[in-house]
Amino acid sequence: MNSPLNIAIFLSGRGSNFEAILNNTLNGTLNITITCVFSNKPAAKGLETAKKHQIPTIAINPSNFNTLDAYEVAVLNELKAYKIDYVICAGYMRILGDTLLNAFSNKMINIHPSLLPKFKGLNAQKQALEAGETESGCTVHYITKDLDDGPIILQRKVPVLSTDTVESLSNRILEQEHIAYSDAIQHLIDQQGD
């Protein structure tokens, strides 16, 4: 049996996708090691969750750096000790630069609240409603230099209801995100065995 994948979680806020992944590691559904949780926001609630579970945390504020490259070099220096196999962006609200993308080429994963390639960028749920879509959902994909454009690992669909608001649609998509992200990580685990 292969040793568990070493995963770094990147987040900027509450970390509900991180919590869903963590719960699946705790209940034995996912055989991974969450080696650290990183945030660009030192007050991110997701960091508190990690600390409660004795997972190492790293917080680096990008406003302390003059360039994106300098910030990402500092992030990389902190991550080096963890021998990371994959970076899982779970609500990490920053565009990634070449430094991190090159360091983790084909090893960075993101989840987006639309059925890509539709509705890239911010407010995807609002975009779906305004376009009159009858279904939406979420996409787990590899991160590339182009925003929300990397190869798709998997998608989960939800119907768009005539009564939907941005909030109600977002909540239903988020429920699927919590399932989809762990399924996608399992796919990465399965690939290791090939």
Image: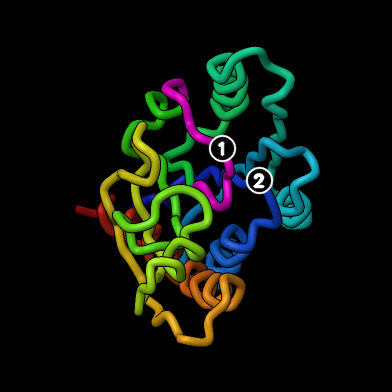
Q: Residue at x 55, y 70 (%)?
A: 170
Displayed quadrant of residue 79: top right
Q: Residue at x 40, y 31 (%)?
A: 104
Q: Which residues are magenta?
A: 89-99
Mark on residue 64? none
Q: Are marks 2 and 1 in contact (CB under 8 Å)?
A: yes
Q: Is residue 139 above or below residue 51?
A: below
- 86 and 83: which is toward the camera: 86
Magenta segment, prevailing SS (helix, strand or loop): loop
Amino acid at the residue labelled 1:
Arg
Q: Can residue 1 be seen from the camera position used here?
A: no
Q: Position of residue 68 (x, y in %)?
A: 56, 20
Q: Position of residue 17 (x, y in %)?
A: 57, 61
Amino acid at the residue labelled 2:
Ser
Q: Which residue is mark 2?
A: 12
On screen, residue 188 versus residue 113, left or right, reads: left
Q: Residue at x 58, y 78 (%)?
A: 168
Q: Residue at x 60, y 68 (%)?
A: 23
* Quadrant for the N terminus in the image: bottom left
Displayed quadrant of residue 149: top left
Q: Is residue 133 above or below residue 11?
A: below
Q: Can residue 166 be seen from the camera position used here?
A: yes
Mark on residue 94? 1
